[in-house]
Amino acid sequence: MCGFCGTLYFDQRPADPQILTRMLDTLQHRGPDDAGIWHNHAIGLASRRLAILDLSAAGHMPMHSADGRLSVAYNGEIYNYPQLRTQLESAKIGLRSHSDTESLLYLYQLYGVEFLQALRGMFALALWDEASQTLTLARDRLGKKPLYYAWQANRLLFASEIKAILAHPQVPRQVDTRWLPHFLAYGYVPTPHTLFSGIQALPPAHYLQLSLANPNPQIQAYWSAPTPPEPYENRSVAEWKHALKEQLRTAVQLRMLSDVPLGAFLSGGIDSSLVVALMREFSSQPVKTFAIGFADSASFNEAPYAKQVAQILGTEHHELLVQPQAVELLPKLVWHLDQPFADSSCIPTFLVSEFARSAVTVALTGDGGDELFAGYERFYAARLAERYQQVPTFLRNLLTQGLASLPQGTDYRNFSRRALRFAQQASLPLSERYLGWV
């Protein structure tokens, strides 16, 4: 994880290195290995680096092209970097490092903003073209890496985290109450909005571009999720399984490109177990896996399952049993999250990340599997509700009343609690039903 911030002034004012330093200081946690500030007249870029590829000084950021025309600050990892490097070398471009950051400069030099189409990875970047006096901000296809900006009358401010923008002395700290209902409904504020007035998030798979000659930001999508073919290809289940496995193998192999210790979070569930199993195929050493358990909550304690999987796969397993003091963690979590976030998963995520950092720098996870493959139980409940709605209304009402009279446990798996939640929402239209369960 790296972090960057920057300023661009449209009133001929030069970038202020003291302000850039102040903004960058809020991002120290994102990059303990290196820091850099660069400014040239109206533009200023600042970066904190967590070194993953090319640990030498050649990977210093902000990074510049050999002729000084292009400068980039960047957060992320380009997984197909080796293939892109070969492509650049074929174009007779002499690369001075083994950092994936450098490939961004010369891909832009060759293809302009279309170079984003070639990137396979997670990233946020700010790229300045001195020749055209143009700034490009871009974010990866699924928005794994954050990027925020504040557009004001005579300047554009941008950063990996909101707190860096708030560190600018001319940015007010005001709540934008228009988006409070969205937060209360979804548990977060949907992109591109934030709960701070004047600060927005660049949407995933989009880029923002503007120049000093035309200081009106143009925001455009460069990718959209592919639509499945209709009708679906005529494949057997075995053929689909093989095709999916090959896609997953490739995805995991690409993400194991690293010059620093690498491991994985392991919960014992399908997604993280599958990732670790595939990692084992491409590792000459036992995979380092990390799990935390909760001593006082059996329904949330996944450590026994993780341990079973670790034994089967022969990983170098690390387990931490904790009794989290959630209230004590809140100030630190709020500071990291920047704005309200109502998913309690941030607590175990923080704890397992802190635990793993003592042994590895990069960790793969199974996050995203439930969304891609309909793993959440509410997806099954939505299907079940279609049949439940065929039950006569008076019977459904009786069942709901009966469930409401039962004691409601606090355990996550408590049957009466979950059954009542299902019955209360099942008769609603699909979108309202799903939102109610969320």
Image (cartoon, helix red, strand yellow):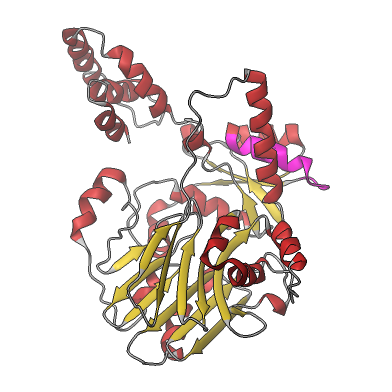
Q: Is residue 423 left or right of residue 57?
A: left
| Number of marks present in the image shown | 0
Q: Is residue 53 above or below residue 376?
A: below
Left or right relative to 405: residue 412: right
Q: Quadrant of residue 69?
A: bottom right
Query: Quadrant where the C terminus lies?
Result: top left
At x 34%, y 60%, the residue is 339
Q: Is residue 283 magenta?
A: yes
Q: Is residue 338 above or below residue 344?
A: below
Q: Is residue 10 above or below residue 235?
A: below
Q: Nearer the viewer, residue 431 or 43?
A: 43
Q: Nearer the viewer, residue 14 or 422?
A: 14
Residue that extends furthest to the right in the rendered view of this protein = 284
Query: Main structural element of the magenta stretch: helix, strand or loop?
Result: helix
Q: Where is residue 15 shown, x and y percent of the image?
A: 42, 89
Rendered-image quadrant of the N terminus: bottom right
Q: Magenta region: which residues? A: 271-286
As drawn, is 197 to the left or to the right of 296?
A: left
Q: Residue 273, position in %: x, y? A: 64, 36
Q: Residue at x 73, y 69 (%)?
A: 54
- Which residue corresponds to the image point at 25% horizontal and 49% vertical from the top-left? 182
Residue 306 on the magenta segment: no
- Tell me the residue at 45%/91% (across/down): 41
Residue 25 lies, in percent from the top left, at: 47, 79
Up-down relation of residue 214 to residue 424 (above or below): below
Q: Is residue 339 visible?
A: yes
- Locate residue 265, reporting x and y percent: 61, 46
Is residue 269 at least partly visible in the picture? no
